[in-house]
Image: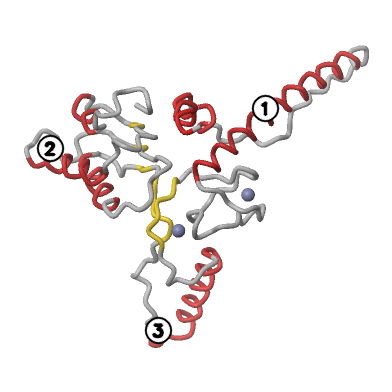
């Protein structure tokens, strides 16, 4: 229901209307996505028996929009979705970085091996995060966030990680990033098209020889779901 349905309809209604629903996408609904209210409605539906616990085969819920900043009710929402579904539900958003509090430093009594292992684990975690453990950030990040220039998948929000770790370019806010990514993909598709035309003429000119060479473009296939989503185009035009 990305951008196509009445924006005032909460997507919760879909769970009741379509009990066999597996994937629900209600993205780019800046003004009608209310995680707290939706969580409450779901809990109410569970309480009054309209929805039975673990009764629907829901696997995935997409609710990302470009103006998600922080969302204090994300955990409650996730838990509630898991309660109504037969499966753990995959959300398309997550928090930028919240350190787990379970790993505490009680290494002394466990002997050298354990201590060393934990030390290694810690330095590995720190290297992976590239920041100190104390830097918690509750900003919302799309799990599909990618660098417009090199398609690197971002771990952190653009405020915490202002430079792309892969291509070292300065990161842009999510909307600007995806607009640029879209432009970039269009240009690339254009280039690929002209390359294909060139390849065709190469095959024609080599036609007399017995060697049949298939020239496959070596450019990596990319996740173009963002770019090809027509509703996204509409969403962009609104803000232009
Ligand atoms: Zn952050
Ligand atoms: Zn990059």
Instruction: Tell me how far mark 1 sits from mark 2, CA to CA.
Output: 47 Å
Query: The residue tagged with tag 1: helix, strand or loop?
Result: helix
Spatial separation of the CA atoms under disc 3 and disc 2: 48 Å
Residue annotated with mark 1:
189
Disc 1/disc 3 C-alpha distance (Å): 57 Å
Please report the residue visible at 37 percent of the width from the left and 77 percent of the height from the top: 104
> In the orientation shown, which residue stands out farthest toward the left?
48
- Is the residue marked by circle 1 packed among few (<14), some (14-19), or many (20+) residues within 10 Å? few
Which residue does the image show at 92% across and 16% down from the upper left? 209
Q: Earlier in the sequence, mark 3 or mark 2?
A: 2
Mark earlier in primary sequence (1, 3): 3
Q: Which mark is residue 45?
A: 2
Against 130, residue 76 (above or below) is: above
Tag 2 secondary structure: helix
Number of the label disc, if any, that sits on residue 110: 3
Is residue 197 toward the left or the right of residue 24 in the image? right
Looking at the rendering, which quadrant does residue 86 occupy? Answer: top left
Q: Residues within 10 Å of mark 3 (few under 14, many from 20)?
A: few
């Amino acid at each position: 229901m990305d951008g196509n349905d009445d924006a005032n309809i909460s997507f919760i209604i879909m769970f009741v209307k379509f009990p066999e629903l597996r994937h629900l996408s209600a993205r780019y609904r800046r003004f009608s996505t209310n995680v707290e209210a939706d969580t409450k409605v779901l809990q109410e539906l569970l309480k009054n028996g309209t929805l039975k616990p673990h009764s629907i085969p829901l696997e995935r819920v997409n609710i990302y929009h470009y103006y998600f900043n922080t969302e204090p009710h994300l955990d409650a929402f996730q838990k509630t979705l898991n309660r109504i579904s037969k499966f753990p539900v995959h959300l398309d958003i997550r928090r930028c970085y919240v350190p787990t509090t379970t790993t505490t430093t009680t290494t002394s009594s466990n002997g050298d091996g354990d201590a060393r292992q934990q030390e290694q684990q810690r330095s590995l975690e720190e290297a992976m995060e590239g920041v100190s453990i104390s830097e918690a950030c509750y900003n919302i990040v799309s799990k599909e966030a990618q660098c417009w220039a090199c398609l690197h998948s971002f771990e952190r929000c653009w405020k915490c990680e202002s430079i792309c770790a892969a291509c070292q370019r300065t990161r842009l806010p999510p909307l600007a990033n995806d607009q640029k990514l879209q432009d970039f993909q269009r240009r690339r598709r254009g280039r690929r098209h002209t390359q294909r035309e060139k390849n065709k003429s190469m095959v024609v000119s080599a036609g007399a020889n017995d060697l049949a060479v298939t020239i496959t473009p070596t450019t990596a296939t990319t996740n173009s779901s963002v770019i090809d989503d027509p509703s996204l185009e509409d969403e962009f035009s609104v803000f232009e």
